[in-house]
Amino acid sequence: MSYQLNKVNPRNFHKTQVKFYLILIPIGLFMILPVLYILNHAFKPLDELFMFPPRFIVQKPTMNNFEMLWQTASTTGVPMSRYLFNSIIVSILAVLGNIVFIAMAGFALSKKKFRLKKTLFEINQL
């Protein structure tokens, strides 16, 4: 690292950072494609969903798929609202657990002295 006297988080943009952006931006765009694909397919009507050749972008978006999901779930006895509630609870608990764990780790790394502290910071700066 040769920019701004080896500061890990420089205050201003420096030309040596361009190489990182040229690598990270395409990777980030590539990683968001599956999410866009799923969201796009959620709003496709059935005739577009099974079209050949398939299209990535929906032509006639519809909310009918979500209505059919709730109707089918209510008539078959599948507790979709319970599954949704369970997913929300698990997600919230996972986020809160991570926040607590990260806060404790951050406190230990900033205030305590221990043998591998310097090694952990060097690994983190790679």
Image: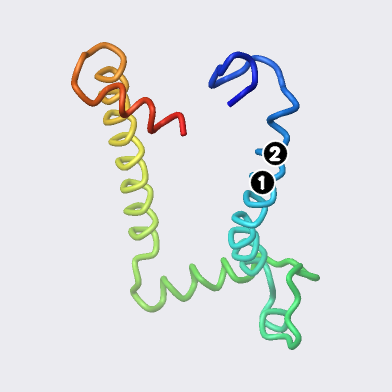
Q: Give the side of residue 72 with respect to residue 28, left or right.
A: left
Residue at image location 27% in from the left, 22% down from the top? 117
> Mark 1 sits on what residue?
23
**Mark 2: secondary structure:** helix
Q: Quadrant of residue 32?
A: bottom right
Instruction: Please provide percent x and percent y for residue 91.
Output: 36, 46
Spot the residue most to the right.
59
Total residue callouts: 2
Spot the residue most to the bottom.
52
Separation of marks 2 and 1 at Cα, in angstroms: 6 Å
Residue at image location 63% in from the left, 49% down from the top? 28
Cβ atoms at labels 2 and 1 below 8 Å apart: yes
**Mark 1: secondary structure:** helix
Q: Give the side of residue 84 with respect to residue 13, left or right.
A: left
Rendered position, 79 above or below 22: below
Q: Is the residue marked by circle 1 packed among few (<14), some (14-19), or many (20+) residues within 10 Å?
A: few
Q: Give the side of residue 93 with respect to residue 5, left or right.
A: left
Given residues 107 and 40, the one toward you in this image is: 107
Q: Amino acid at mark 1?
A: Ile
Q: Amino acid at mark 2?
A: Lys
Residue at image location 59% in from the left, 55% down from the top? 31
> Mark 2 sits on what residue?
19
Instruction: Please provide percent x and percent y for residue 35.
Output: 59, 58
Q: Quadrant of residue 102?
A: top left
Given residues 110 and 87, the one toward you in this image is: 110
Given residues 87 and 34, the one toward you in this image is: 34
Q: Give the side of residue 89 with respect to residue 14, left or right.
A: left
Given residues 120 and 34, the one toward you in this image is: 120
Instruction: Please provide percent x and percent y for residue 54.
Output: 73, 81
